[in-house]
Image: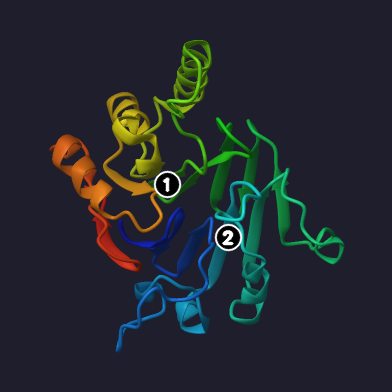
Amino acid sequence: MQAEVYHLFHSGTAVRVKNKLFIFDYYQDQPQQEKALQSSLEKGIVREDSFKNIKEAYVFVSHSHHDHYNRVIFDWEKYCDQISYILAAEVEPEPELKNKDNLYLMEKDEELQLEQINISSYGSTDEGVSFLVELENLAIFHAGDLNWWKWKKFTEEVQKREAREYKREVEKFKDKQIDIAFVPVDPRLEEHYYLAGEYFIDQVKPALFVPIHFADNYDVTKFFKDRFNSNQTRVAEITEPGEKILYTRK
């Protein structure tokens, strides 16, 4: 099983598996830099050509924060006949969208079956949910804002609570075999940027770990890779929007 993995921008990611396309937390709809002779996904954006030869598309929104949700996603129906939208229940789509038969709202700890795709929602340590998507011997996890938020401004008590809540969510799926994991590596946490990723790798052991939630601070992904890449978990280094990573399940 081979997948094409794209880092779009910040927490926006896409995974293409055969004729299926999965897009998570799309936010930045303008290319950060123009790159000729490359597909839109390789420029970090979603356009009509992104759906070429795609029969099924699944679009996920983990929560309503502006850096995770762009309403342009609903324009993509023009490009794909079979497209499903899976949103955290706390997201408030426009009234005219709420009754769409291809829109699904999920609270945490729910399951949804779409065709041969099984979707599980887990909690977040901020708003909304995180998603686990399982299909044809491939499992994709997108954390959204599920992170170990150890802010220096927090009291020691709050920091302990944040750690406890993060670990509690990871405990729910740590025995799953996850192929591709998108997990925050946020440089705003300064020296604590790595905590969520380190714990996730230790407990879940994903085959491929792809950092998210770092805006344009790409250097942090190199620091993380240098520290945690191993034979057990391959860590992707992201250098630009549209970074393409090939993953093959062994």
Q: Which residue is mark 1?
A: 140
Q: Residue at x 51, y 44 (%)?
A: 144
Q: In the image, is residue 16 above or below residue 150?
A: below
The x, y position of residue 181, in whole percent, is: 37, 43
Q: Which residue is mark 2?
A: 59
Q: Calculate the distance from the C-alpha at mark 2 to the C-alpha at mark 1.
A: 13 Å
- Disc 2: CA contacts within 10 A as few (<14), some (14-19) or many (>=20): many
The x, y position of residue 123, in whole percent, is: 58, 31
Q: Quadrant of the N terminus?
A: bottom left
Q: Residue at x 33, y 35 (%)?
A: 190
Quadrant hosting residue 112: top right
Sequence-earlier tag: 2 or 1: 2
The x, y position of residue 185, in whole percent, is: 35, 41
Q: Residue at x 50, y 66 (%)?
A: 28
Q: Secondary structure at mark 1?
A: strand
The x, y position of residue 18, in whole percent, is: 39, 67
- Cβ atoms under marks 2 and 1 closer than 8 Å: no
Three-letter amino acid code of the residue under disc 2? Val
Q: Nearer the viewer, residue 190 or 165?
A: 190
Q: How is the image coloured?
A: rainbow
